[in-house]
Image (cartoon, helix red, strand yellow):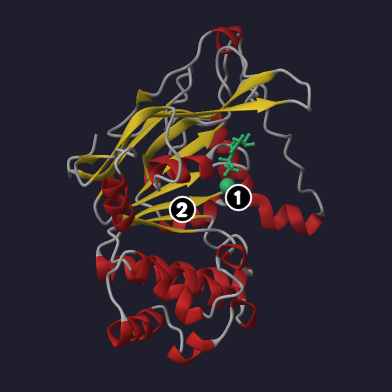
Amino acid sequence: MSTTPAFLSAQDLHKTYRVRSGLFGASRTLHAVSGVGFDIPAGNTFGLVGESGSGKSTLARLLLAAEPATAGTLHIDGQPLSLRNTRARKAFHRLIQPVLQDPYASLNPMMRIGEIVAEPMRVHGLLQGKALQARVTSLLESVGLMPDLAVRYPNQLSGGQRQRVAIARALGLSPRALVLDEPVSALDVSIQAQILNLLKEIQRAQALTYVLISHDLAVVAYMSDQIGVLYLGEFMEIGPRDAVLRHPAHPYTRTLIAASETRVDAAATGALAAPTEIPSPVALPAGCRYQARCQHVTARCREEKPVLRGLAGTHRVACHFDLTPNTPYPHKVHT
Ligand SMILES: Nc1ncnc2c1ncn2[C@@H]1O[C@H](COP(=O)(O)OP(=O)(O)O)[C@@H](O)[C@H]1O
Ligand SMILES: [Mg+2]
């Protein structure tokens, strides 16, 4: 637990979907998010890393109150989220705004940039006329765009410019938090750092709280105060950035770090292994969800589900084994 009061806090969030395999297939339960919880102090960045299908975007939608959780609770600024009351939901949306992966898909191609940025403020009835126009100009400037871009359309902008527009739009309601779901994944590597640095600058200036989601550990490492490593809808490891990166205790975290460190070398030699696909969240195994991939798997892992347990401070891991942060790795495990 953090000593500073949490601005955004999630307790035991679950999200399941009913899915059908084929037209006449039986309906089954897909577990997208299973028992996720965290506390994010105001002004901090919580980085959520995990490969495709691990439940990151589902979690983002729960945090944005875009869909209801199947179970669990969410608090923002000490207030519990209730989706039933429209007024409360609107107030909630003003506090926490999204920036999504593909600005081309998330910006209406038929609308001019100025209108796109103005829309949330208009919908919430915050400003109108000249005041609204002036606010749009200042928002565009605050994300490093020329105000005369306001008359253009999304397809006339570069990917980086479009993501700046998405950020300006999110900031219009003066939110206290942003959920950034893969905010740079669709951008050229050369542009990624510019956008990440802009996000850092804005965070400092406005004391914003961020949930930063990425499949790219390097992005999460660069931005975050705390990191949560998600696999098949559960945290395998969570804790302060340096603890997780310097003393990774979960085999999956170690794999992600190793992959992130060797990517350039491996790509150059063509040795980049295609990762095995993430198992289906419909047919989950008993025991540890990571068992199919784990090189240290034992009989116990197939039977008993490891729960998150504390290491040093707020650093926690969901693994039966004592891969103590300072023990050299690989480490001998007996079956
Ligand atoms: N609306 C939905 N209906 C059914 N399954 C869904 C829905 N949204 C997500 N899923 C499933 O939930 C799992 C997690 O997806 P997602 O949250 O998009 O992961 P990520 O963003 O980490 O790639 C996936 O198996 C995905 O197919
Ligand atoms: Mg996603």
Report the amino acid beneath label 2: Ala
Report x, y in % for residue 128.
Answer: 30, 79
In the picture as drawn, the residue positioned furthest to the right comes out as 270
Is residue 263 left or right of 8 when viewed as pictured? Answer: right
Residue 210, horizontal then vertical, whole percent = 36, 55
- Report the amino acid beneath label 1: Ser
Check disc 1 and report the residue beneath it.
260
Question: Which residue is at the front of the view, 144 or 19?
Answer: 19
Q: Quadrant of ligand 1?
A: top right
Image quarter where the N terminus lies is: top left
Residue closer to the observer: 228 or 95 = 95
Q: Residue at left 63%, top 83%?
A: 156
Left or right? Give the position of 281 relative to 309.
right
Q: Left or right? Give the position of 96 relative to 188.
A: left
Q: Nearer the viewer, residue 90 or 79?
A: 90
Note whether ligand 1 is within 8 Å of mark 1: no
Q: Is residue 10 above or below residue 335?
A: below
Give yes or no for contact between labels 1 and 2 (Cβ–Cβ under 8 Å).
yes
- What's the residue at 53%, 45% (across, down)? 57
Q: Which residue is mark 2?
A: 221
